[in-house]
Amino acid sequence: MLLTALQYDNRIFGLDPQLAFQLLFQMLAVFLLFVLGSYLLLDPVRKILNDRKERIAREQKEAASARDEALAFKEEYDKKLKEIDRQAEQILSEARRKALAREEEIIQDAREEAARIVSAAHGEAELEKVRVRDEVKQEIISVAALMSEKIIGSSVDQAMQNDLFEQTIKEMGEETWLS
């Protein structure tokens, strides 16, 4: 044992060539395991991360595209709403214009009807005046005939009555009967 202790005394850190070779071999083995592990384990993880990064970038592009499309649809919808509002206002103004024209037409028809009624009433009034005038004339003729019978004391026939009436009217004038 003493010999083994002496053997280890001459070496730095107790390294002999075999131990140095083993250390070198182990470092090489660890390095190879690291390379192999990174190839087998880290490459798939890197691939998964890269795929995820690409998927996220693609989804962001799709989201931006969808947002732009939604904004375009919104603008189109707003334009259509404005167009519908404009058309509704145009239809309402056209309806108002037609209603005013119809109102004027109805008023004009009512005025014409009122004028016809007034005209017909005037015509009827004129006919009634003429009829009353004729009745009054007949009544006056009858009264005049009776009075003349009493005054003359004799009977007056129809022809004589008419002659007397015509003569009386000529003496009184047409203006008296027309008023």
Image (spheres, rainbow, N blue to C red):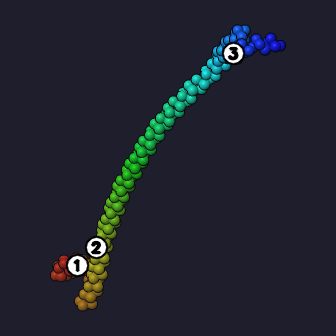
Residue at point 63%, 18% (across, down) = 43
Q: Amino acid at mark 2?
A: Val
Residue at point 57%, 26% (across, down) = 53
Q: Amino acid at mark 1?
A: Ser
Mark 3 closeness class: few <14, some 14–19, many ≥20 residues within 10 Å: few
Q: Amino acid at mark 3?
A: Ile
Quadrant of the drawing holding the N terminus? top right
**Residue that mark 2 sits on:** 130
x%, y% of residue 170?
17, 79
Q: Is residue 29 visible?
A: no
**Residue that mark 1 sits on:** 179
**Quadrant hosting residue 57:** top right
Q: Secondary structure at mark 3?
A: loop
* Among numbered discs 3 and 1, the one appearing first in the sequence: 3
Q: Secondary structure at mark 2?
A: helix
Q: Is residue 53 visible?
A: yes
